[in-house]
Image (tube, rainbow, N blue to C red):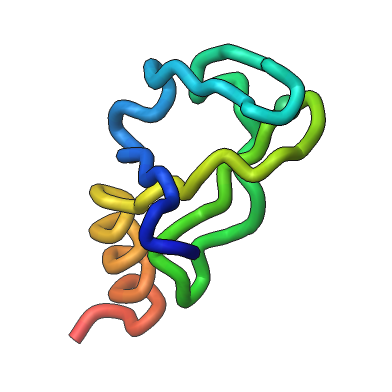
Amino acid sequence: MNARDKIFEQRSFDDETLHCPHCGWVGPGSDAHVAGFYGLSKFKEVQCPDCNEYLGNLSRDRSTREAQRGWDSQIGPI
Ligand SMILES: [Zn+2]
């Protein structure tokens, strides 16, 4: 990602109004296409659902804790 990239917060993303500079699509974040998995990255790529133009990054915030819980549960009870 580049420093000028737009960063969306996950908790407000569904209500965020996105605009595609490529095809002119405008819609809520819930209609946008979010690509890939977080994995080692802190961000997912947000893409236009019509033309797949890259629109920005979706930041994982509270999901970090959920991922942490998942990790703990894999270790099992101490
Ligand atoms: Zn587009």
- Residue nearer the viewer, 37 or 24: 24
- Residue nearer the viewer, 66 or 44: 44
Question: Which residue, as the protein is rendered here, is positioned at the far left?
Answer: 78
Q: To which quarter of the image does residue 67 belong?
A: bottom left
How many labels sit on residues?
0
Position in image of residue 7 (x %, y %): 37, 46
Question: Which residue, as the protein is rendered here, is positioned at the far right?
Answer: 51
Q: Residue at x 30, y 27 (%)?
A: 12
Above or below, 75 against 21 in this view is: below
Q: Where on the image, by quarter, is ligand 1? A: top right
Above or below, 77 against 52 in this view is: below
Position in image of residue 70 (x %, y %): 37, 66
Q: Residue at x 24, y 58 (%)?
A: 65
On-image quarter of the C terminus? bottom left
Position in image of residue 63 (x %, y %): 32, 51
Query: In this image, 58 relative to 60: left or right?
Result: right
Query: In this image, 52 relative to 64: left or right?
Result: right
Q: To which quarter of the image does residue 8 belong?
A: top left
- Residue nearer the viewer, 16 or 22: 22
Q: Residue at x 58, y 59 (%)?
A: 37
Query: In this image, 49 relative to 15: left or right?
Result: right
Above or below, 74 against 38 in this view is: below
- Residue nearer the viewer, 31 or 24: 24
